[in-house]
Image (tube, rainbow, N blue to C red):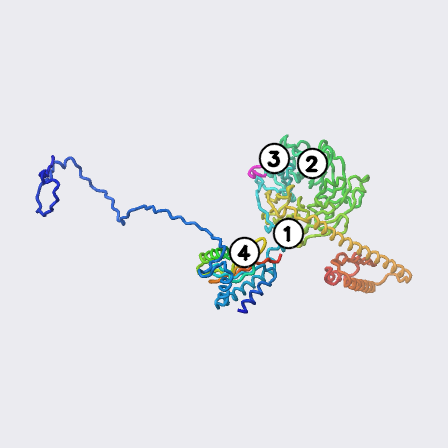
Amino acid sequence: MEIVYVYTKKRNEFGRQCNFSDRSAELHVDILPDPSLAVNFIERDPCDVPIQCTQEMSEHEVNTERFESDTRGINHVEGGWPKDVNPHEMEQTIRFRKKVEKDENYISTVMQLGNNMEHCIKQNNAIDIYREYFEEEEVVEESEVQPSAKTINVFRDPNEVKRTASSLSWHPDGSRKLAVAYSSLEFQKVSKDMSLNSYIWDIENPNKPEMTLKPVSPLVCLEYNPKDCHILVGGSYNGQIAYWDTRKGSQPVEMSTIEHSHRDPVYRVIWLQSKTGTDTFSASTDGQVLWWDIRKMSEPTERLILDPNKKGNLDNALGAISLEFETTMPTKFMVGTEQGLVVSCNRKAKTPAEKIVCMYSGHHGPIYALQRNPFFPKNFLTVADWTARIWSEDIKESSIMWTKYHTAYLSDGSWSPVRPSVFFTIKMDGTLDVWDFLFKQNDPTLSVKVCDEALNSLRVQDNGHFLACGSQLGTVTLLEISSGLCTLQKNEKALATAMFERETKREKILEARHREMRLKERSRSEQSKEEDTKEGDGEESPEELITRIEKDFYEIVEAELKKRDKGEEKKVRLILNSFTGLRVVRGSLRVVKGSSKIVKGFTNKGGGPDSTL
Amino acid sequence: MAEVEETLKRIQTHKGVIGTIVVNAEGIPIRTTLDNSTTVQYAGLLHQLTMKARSTVRDIDPQNDLTFLRIRSKKHEIMVAPDKEYMLIVIQNPSE
């Protein structure tokens, strides 16, 4: 439907100005709603209408004309003289200056500024702040890191019945593998279910051992051949020695014959330095040290019986628990015994009597670990009973350094292969102690509780960074030592040398004194012997004996006290060699021939070197 | 007047002092111990620098103000004590 409204204008009215006038409204068109059209549409219900209630804003952009600014300095040739002063005329400038100088403001300002300035000038003259004052002092880089040991991995005995991890050996090439010997060292605790196997673990995989070694009897000790990384030799509980080749499987390649082996468990087996690389020697508590060539295991190549009387009598022999062999000294070796003695032997001696060179005593119990210091082979470490001791080869009477008596038994120990002053010890209460005697001598530098059960064996890896310790329940823990304890400090060798020398010297001096005293006493007692025979009194009555002993004793005590005042001594060792053989050793009195109870009463009083003496 | 003379003289006679300049706000050297051209150069340049330094200090903290300016160079040290109307400049060769 079209709605049209026509506007008309006469032609002659074109161009005329517009005259506006009001007119009432006129209805031109009225369009009524047509319901029929609603059919074309659908009602929408609901209606979605967005509404926004905000301020209406509009955005505009304006570009102004560019305003460029530039910073320039002006170099004055002449200052900003006021207009009336001609800068080139001297007179005028001088006059101006004089005028300014008379200004009060000027005076006060200059005074004030002058004071400030003087202070700074004097400062400059007093000290040169840019001079290098401390060029001699080097920056000492001290690692403030606390020594620590972190457990990396734990290897558990896969068998149900747990056995002690009695020995550990690192793979010689790169130390990626660890051979662990499992056995039960407790008396008669071997049960039928107990497995005989020992394992080789890959340190990355603690879940399953890499290889199993199946001996006839549980292995007490196990060692990798340092020359050939596939060969291992093990000493077993029944006294036999066996060797394995890891390329050939779990069964031993060869075992020594029972008749010629040890009669007791083999506690230690070490590879020797030889051209063939097949020599080993083993030690056991039956008192024998046997040498073997693994190519011929039917019979040992050599035999040594640890008889202190040098007679080769097996009944007197000392039981050997640990062995020590240093490749730099191939003819000498040391044996640590159950009785607490360290026997130093020479392999090349002609007769068995000469084989045993000397013995070091000082421990109260079996010596579980014996090792020379890799940097100072003359000094060696022994770990036994409740202490660890450091000895010097030359001093046979006592150790040069020792730790205090601990509450738990020490079961193994080892020097650090990288630092001459660091050594490790493990105790029966499950703690690992790291000692650094250049840092602290009375206490361990670091003490870590590795596990709740007793620790039995310890082995440090060749780089000194890792160590493995085996426990009574067969758990082997791999620990990482903080770098401070395994990097060589500057001057460490020199300091360690100085310390060893000092302690050795001290012991030597004490030994010399000791000998002197002994000689004196002997000569005195000989004199008194002569006197007695001259008198011909015969047997003295016990009371007279007692009084005489008393007198002797007190005399010697007085003499010692006087001497003590003169010099400083840490230990007092007296030997009184009198008739009844009163002997004072290390401050404890023991009556050898046992006379009367009253004399024994002195035993209790003279307890330690510091008390009565 | 006499004190001013005395002060300036004292400053000049300190160890290492090469020259002393008193400049006013317009850059006119009132008192100087150096030759004119050097003086004028120092005055002009240091004035600008002092202004800049002062504005820096005040920009950082409006309550603050510049009290002293020291420039240490390889050859000597230039010390500027600024004020509202005048400026005291001293060139010293420090103890080295």
Identify the secondary structure beneath mark 1. Answer: loop
The residue lying toward the viewer, choosing from A57 and A54, is A57
Q: Mark 1 lies on which chain?
A: A
User: In the image, residue A544 lies at what x, y percent?
Assistant: 83, 64
Query: Which quadrant would the C terminus of chain A be assigned to in this image?
Result: bottom right
The residue at which mark 4 appears reads as: B38
| Chain-order first, disc 2 or disc 3 | 3
Does A208 lie within the magenta span?
A: yes
Q: Mark 3 lies on which chain?
A: A
Q: Is there one chain holding both mark 4 and mark 1?
A: no
Q: Mark 3 points at which residue?
A: A212
Q: In which quarter of the image is residue A461?
A: top right
**Residue identified by numbered label 1:** A138
Q: Distance between the residues labelled 2 and 3?
A: 17 Å
User: Which mark's residue is nearer the viewer, 3 or 1?
Assistant: 1
* Bounds of the magenta segment: A203-213
